Amino acid sequence: MDPTLINGIPAHPLLVHVVVVLLPLSALCLVACAAWPPVMRRFGLALPVLALVSLVFVPLTTSAGEWLQERVPESSLVEKHAEMGDELLPWAIGLLVVAVLVWFAYRRSSSSELPATAPGTARTGRPATVVWAIAVVLSVVVAVGAVVQVYRIGDSGAKSVWRGSFTTSGN
């Protein structure tokens, strides 16, 4: 089923809010879990589940946006927004993949092998530190990429809706 309307309102602007909240939240949680294993210990399976839910809402929102795009006047701003929206899915997939890898690495490691706070302060051997350092770097890269893309898409969407449609002076 393709969501197009929710209570008579186009679904896209409503679904956008889910993505705008969940994807950056997933990114923040991913970096926190990768950088601080005690945080990962508390999150457990919730980290990849949160990333999965975020991922599911990206194509739903994009699909609803494509439906809406066919029903609004054509403009270069709307076209740019739609093109940018299509670029979010790879970042959401990357976020899920890295979240699963961080979760899996945590599960495979015994708690005695995990760094105490961060990779640079590990009490254990070099292999665990290297693995967690790589996890932190990958997490930061995919998290920053996803959040920046969410911002860029949101900015272009706001411009496509609001640019030229209001006055700065009152009544």
Image (tube, grey):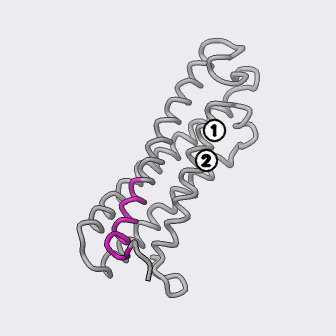
Magenta segment, prevailing SS (helix, strand or loop)? helix
Q: Nearer the viewer, residue 83 or 162?
A: 162
Measuring from the top left, give residue 22's x and y in whole percent.
Answer: 58, 56
Which of the labelled discs sits on residue 103, or is there none? 1
SS at badge 2: helix
Q: Amino acid at mark 2?
A: Pro
Q: Amino acid at mark 1?
A: Trp
The range drawn in magenta is: 152-167
> Residue 72 lies in what quarter of the image?
bottom left
SS at badge 1: helix
Seen in the picture, residue 104 relative to 22 is either above or below; the reply is above
Q: Quadrant of the C terminus?
A: bottom left
Q: Is 160 inside the magenta-drawn segment?
A: yes
Seen in the picture, residue 6 relative to 39 is either above or below; the reply is below
> Residue 162 lies in what quarter of the image?
bottom left
Q: Is 82 inside the magenta-drawn segment?
A: no
Q: Which residue matches tag 2? A: 48
Q: Is residue 52 left or right of residue 60?
A: right
**Are the residues flagged by discs 2 and 1 in contact, CB closer than 8 Å?**
yes
Q: Nearer the viewer, residue 83 or 156?
A: 156
